[in-house]
Image (cartoon, rainbow, N blue to C red):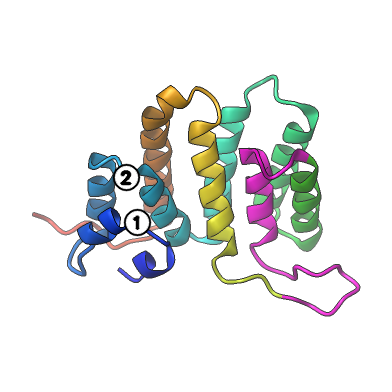
Amino acid sequence: MAICSVAELGEPALALARPDLHPTAFLAQLVEKKLYPDAVRFLAHALPKREAVWWAWMCARRTAGESAPAPVRAALDATEKWIAHPGESQRRAAKAAADAAGLDCPAGCAGLAAFFSGGSLAPPEAPPVPPGEFLTAKAVSGAVVFAAVATEPENAPEKFQNFVAQALDVANRVHLWDPKPEA
């Protein structure tokens, strides 16, 4: 599983990885062993960028709740607009809203993930500076992990399990992996 080499998984997670192990079986083992951040990092690197940002946004939105501060709501709104229409103006608006919300919250990380999805990191008038290949995944990982632990950290294991299940549903919908081989 090439993803393991770029997702910065911990040693216990890497010890579980085998070339013959289907990704969903690997994820099931990570969850069983309560290696939730590793499962999040693996999924963030495996999903296509737009779907990964959508996953981060969903997790951030759940954590923010109905009474989120205005900058957090604005970051969620801007990221949602990019997800619906991933154009350059929406990408830059997601970054501006993420900056205003702060990168110390899931919504800010989700907006940053949208910004890192393509285009240039430089201002529009400057020569283009493409984002690193895995910056979106890193920001998605941050958003999802933050979302699991930011509020009610005692419920983090349950939230992680729900978030991983949601990402697996997305992976299945986009046919990310071949069907799981029959046992």
Disc 2 target residue: 35
The picture places residue 52, in percent across and down from the top left corner, at 52, 53
Number of numbered callouts drawn: 2
Q: SS class of the residue under badge 1?
A: loop
- Residue for point 51% across, 42% down: 144
**Foreground pick, 66 / 40:** 40
Image quadrant occupied by the C terminus: bottom left
Tell which tag, 1 or 2, sits nearer the viewer: 1
Disc 1 target residue: 10
Tell me the amino acid under the disc marked 1: Gly
The crowding category of the residue bearing disc 1, from other C-alpha atoms within 10 Å (few below 14, some 14 to 19, many at least 20), is few
- Residue for point 50% across, 22% down: 152
Q: Is residue 89 left or right of residue 34?
A: right
* Residue 166 location, quadrant: top left
Q: SS class of the residue under badge 2?
A: loop
Circles 1, 2 touching at the beta carbon (< 8 Å): yes
The numbered mark at residue 73 is none
Q: Give the range drawn in magenta.
A: 101-129
Question: Main structural element of the magenta stretch: helix, strand or loop?
Answer: loop
Q: Earlier in the sequence, mark 1 or mark 2?
A: 1
Image quadrant occupied by the N terminus: bottom left
The picture places residue 112, in percent across and down from the top left corner, at 68, 53
Is-magenta flag for residue 118?
yes
Q: In this view, does 129 lie to the left or right of 16?
A: right
- Residue for point 40% across, 36% down: 160
Q: Which residue is most to the front?
A: 11
Tell me the amino acid under the disc marked 2: Leu
Q: Which residue is most to the bottom?
A: 127
